[in-house]
């Protein structure tokens, strides 16, 4: 296999959360992302799914070096960039960008669209001259916005158009890797397909690599080549898209499929997982999913399953299919 464009090795991010009240000053570690191994091949779209709070955004932000890991390593084109700082990091940032869920919240309302999209160029040393303005105009056109949009402000646009501005801003430095953090979740269903199609067109035109984050499997089905499923800070299943949707091995993935009926129309659906995701501050012992799993066995309450590869390219962390299952 060729070198992945992006690779996480045992990547973790833990937070110290105050749980004992102001006076007692007790801090409990919250394992938002816990020893994740994941790679994204050049040119592919890896979908990253899981319920709210399971660590998707934290992982995505670490992969573009917006947040440092507590431990573990991040590799870009095979080079360890975990400790990269200063001018080297600024150079690296040109190659990795992020698009956020809320196109309104992530765009400065007092800046014109031209200034918003041009800002990364200026941060990286360009002048706000005719050449920069021409680059912005070309970028706006490429994301399907008219050139006159440059003089307007974010509040003058619909949600879908604002997301196009966010995408233009992320692409102006010609990155190779883009984390798309729930880029369509805040948009009307009628607008979502247009943004997903745009992202696919841009990927083909510009040779981009995507990590596409979503909380349900239906959203990533269309766009992903492979899918990774996260639960309480851990990746519990990774496989080719077809294998995930037709032959999910992890009970949590099955439950996510049940929660997204459009994924397999007409098929008998597995039951949804009962209850909510437990707090990451009170991680269940053994398999983190065991309090909600309909297949739970004695071993699951005591031993945390590790990621194994029962089929080529299909990884799962579950005692049902892993070693000892
Ligand atoms: P969502 O879809 O709701 O954004 P997510 O899967 O992206 O969820 P994260 O936002 O990465 O999950 O959060 C993972 C866990 O880390 C959650 O329990 C969250 O409360 C916690 N967390 C995130 N940021 C911080 C922080 N700055 N301080 C403390 N805890 C945090
Ligand atoms: Fe369910 Fe056990 Fe598999 Fe966890 S390890 S998902 S509890 S069967």
Image (tube, rainbow, N blue to C red):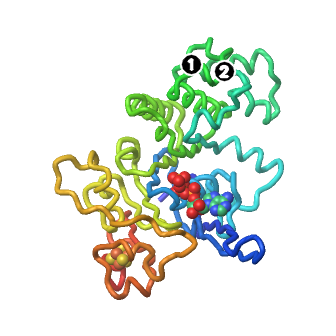
Q: Is residue 119 above or below residue 219?
A: above
The residue drawn where x is 83% and y is 51% is 86
Position of 250 with respect to 282 (left or right) is left
Q: In this view of the protein, can residue 3 be seen by the observer?
A: no
SS of the residue under disc 2 = loop
The residue tagged 1 is: 141
The answer to which quarter of the image holds residue 255 is: bottom left
Q: In which quadrant of the rendered image does the C terminus lie?
A: bottom left
The residue drawn where x is 38% and y is 33% is 189
Decide which of 224, 19 is in the foreground and name it: 19
Residue 218 coordinates in the image, percent (x, y): 35, 46
Position of 62 with respect to 238 (left or right) is right
Q: CA distance from mark 1 to mark 2?
A: 17 Å
The residue tagged 2 is: 153
Q: Is residue 91 above or below residue 188?
A: below
Crowd rating for badge 2 (residues with CA inside 10 Å; few <14, some 14–19, many 20+): some
| Pointer 2 residue Cβ closer than 8 Å to ligand 1 | no
Q: Is residue 44 above or below residue 238?
A: above
The answer to which quarter of the image holds residue 289 is: bottom left
Decide which of 323, 281 is in the foreground and name it: 281
Crowd rating for badge 1 (residues with CA inside 10 Å; few <14, some 14–19, many 20+): some
**Quarter of the rendered image showing ligand 2:** bottom left
The residue drawn where x is 37% and y is 51% is 217
Q: In this view of the protein, can residue 184 be seen by the observer?
A: yes
Residue 237 coordinates in the image, percent (x, y): 40, 65
Q: Is residue 191 above or below residue 273?
A: above
């Amino acid at each position: 296999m060729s070198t992945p464009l992006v690779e996480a090795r045992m990547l973790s991010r833990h937070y110290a959360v105050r749980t004992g009240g102001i006076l007692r000053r007790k801090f409990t570690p919250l394992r938002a992302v816990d020893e994740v191994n994941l790679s994204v091949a050049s040119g592919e779209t890896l979908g990253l799914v899981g319920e709210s709070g399971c660590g998707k955004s934290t992982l995505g932000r670490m992969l573009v070096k917006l947040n440092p890991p507590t431990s573990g390593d991040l590799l870009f084109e095979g080079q360890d960039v975990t400790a990269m700082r200063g001018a080297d990091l600024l150079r690296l940032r040109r190659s990795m960008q992020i698009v956020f869920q809320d196109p309104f919240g992530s765009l400065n309302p007092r800046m014109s669209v031209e200034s918003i999209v041009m800002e990364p160029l200026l941060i990286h040393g360009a002048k706000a001259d005719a050449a920069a303005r021409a680059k912005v105009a070309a970028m706006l056109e490429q994301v399907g916005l008219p050139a006159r949009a440059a003089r307007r402000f974010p509040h003058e646009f619909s949600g879908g158009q604002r997301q196009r501005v966010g995408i233009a801003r992320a692409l102006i430095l010609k990155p190779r890797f883009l984390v798309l953090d729930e880029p369509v979740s805040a948009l009307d269903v009628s607008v979502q397909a247009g943004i997903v199609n745009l992202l696919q067109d841009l990927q083909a035109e510009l040779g981009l690599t995507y990590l596409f984050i979503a909380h349900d499997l239906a959203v990533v089905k269309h766009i992903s080549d492979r899918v990774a499923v996260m639960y309480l800070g851990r990746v519990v299943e990774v496989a080719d898209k077809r294998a995930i949707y037709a032959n999910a091995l992890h009970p949590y993935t099955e439950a996510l499929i049940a929660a997204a009926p459009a994924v397999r129309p007409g098929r008998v659906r597995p039951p949804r997982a009962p209850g909510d995701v437990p707090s990451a501050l009170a991680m269940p012992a053994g398999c983190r999913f065991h309090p909600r799993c309909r297949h739970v066995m004695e071993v699951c309450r005591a031993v945390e399953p590790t990621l194994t590869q029962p089929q080529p390219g299909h990884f799962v962390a579950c005692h049902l299919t892993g070693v000892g299952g």
